[in-house]
Image (cartoon, helix red, strand yellow):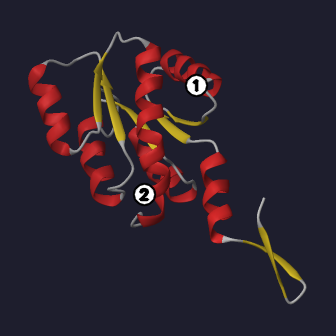
Amino acid sequence: MQRRQSLGTTLKTPHVQQADRELAPTTVLVIDDDPEMRALLKDVLEGAGHRVLQEADGDRVIPSLESERVDVVILDKEMPGVNGMDLLAFLRHRWPTTPVILITAFGGPNVAAEALRLGAARYLEKPFRVAQLAEMVRTLAPSAAWCSQGRTD
């Protein structure tokens, strides 16, 4: 690891600080009212080396996003309280650089088009292969890590 000496204090160079950020696990926020789906996604994503936060509904998402750095959001469309599409629109406005993957059991071409229009980075219909979702997170995570510095929170 490269370091510089400055007035007796060891400082990391900016290049090393960027490398350290790259080594930090990707933080994924899973928002789904189904506890079994949340548990499954947590197991799969943690197995892939990600840090996973979970929320059961849209009402508690904002405090999580304001208190934690989140690199990728996985959002269920159908939930009690704030629905996934409204939450997607809010997330894109408040945290425009954080990618959102919208998942739903109630989809179709019109829902997919609306999700993408509202700013979802990806869209998946249940049932889906969890390996496919994990790959989406992996491909979205590098851009999220670099963009999280520019968040508007």
Q: Is residue 33 visible?
A: no
Q: Is residue 64 visible?
A: yes
Mark 1 sits on what residue? 42
Q: Quadrant of the N terminus?
A: bottom right
**Residue most extreme to the left:** 110
Q: CA distance from mark 1 to mark 2?
A: 23 Å
Label 2 near label 1: C-beta < 8 Å? Answer: no
Label 2 packing within 10 angstroms: few (<14), some (14-19), many (20+) = some
Relative image position of residue 92 (x, y in whole percent): 29, 52
Q: Quadrant of residue 3?
A: bottom right
**Residue most extreme to the bottom:** 7
Q: Tell me the residue at 44%/49% (across/down).
A: 144
Check disc 1 and report its element: helix, strand or loop: helix
Relative image position of residue 42 (x, y in whole percent): 58, 25
Q: Nearer the viewer, residue 32 or 16?
A: 16
Return the disc, 1 or 2, that comes first in the chain's sequence.
1
Q: Tell me the residue at 48%/24% (across/down).
A: 134
The three-letter code of the residue at mark 1 reads Lys
**Residue most extreme to the right:** 8
